[in-house]
Image (cartoon, rainbow, N blue to C red):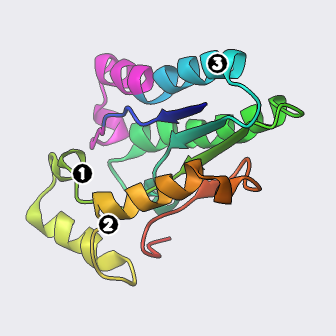
Amino acid sequence: DILINNAGIMCFQKIETLDDETIEKVLAINLKGSLYTMREAAKRLEQGGKIINLSSSVIGMKLEGYGIYSASKAAIEVLTAILAKELRGRNISVNAIAPGPTATELFFEGKSEALIEQLAKAAPLERLGTVEDIAAVLDFAVSDASNWINAQVIRANGGII
């Protein structure tokens, strides 16, 4: 049994300008939605199950304008580690994957060409990640090859942090 928590929305806005509705929406989707599914998976997964939560490497970058988004994803990383411990003895692993800047519709939304270029060049590999890059990490995370990995965050980000 496998749960992949991938739902999320991006919010690129300075903290001082956030309205209550935006805060609630980001937390409802990025944090609460993942928390609810983790809770239900913890009740239902069989021995050997896997929970993979999607986080973001933007947490480590601490970029202006990403406050509420980063906070929601930081919470996911903490919950990942705690749930892994709470599932002790059930042979269920709980990990997170934290992509760096990845060429998706969500990433491009609301960003200037200059910012996109800056982020693409920030990693030592000097490019945006691709959906295929992240899918390969997910393939590994759900495979038997990852059975000894638990309570970890895998940062698939081209070395940006």
Q: Which residue is mark 1?
A: 107
Which residue lies at the image location 34% right of the left edge and 76% below the top edge? 122
Relative side of 101 to 85, left or right = left
Circle 3 Cα neighbour tier, 10 Å, few/some/many (<14 / 14–19 / ≥20)? few
Reading the image, the residue beneath label 2 is 129
**Location of mark 3 (residue):** 39
Is residue 58 visible to the viewer in this orientation of the structure? Answer: yes
Q: Is residue 28 magenta?
A: yes
User: Disc 2 or 3, which lies upstream in sequence?
Assistant: 3
Q: Is residue 126 above or below residue 89?
A: below
Residue sticking out furthest to the right? 89
106 shown above or below 4: below
The amino acid marked with disc number 1 is Phe
Predominant SS of the magenta segment: helix
Left or right relative to 25: residue 146 = right
Looking at numbered disc 3 in the image, what kind of residue is underneath it? Arg
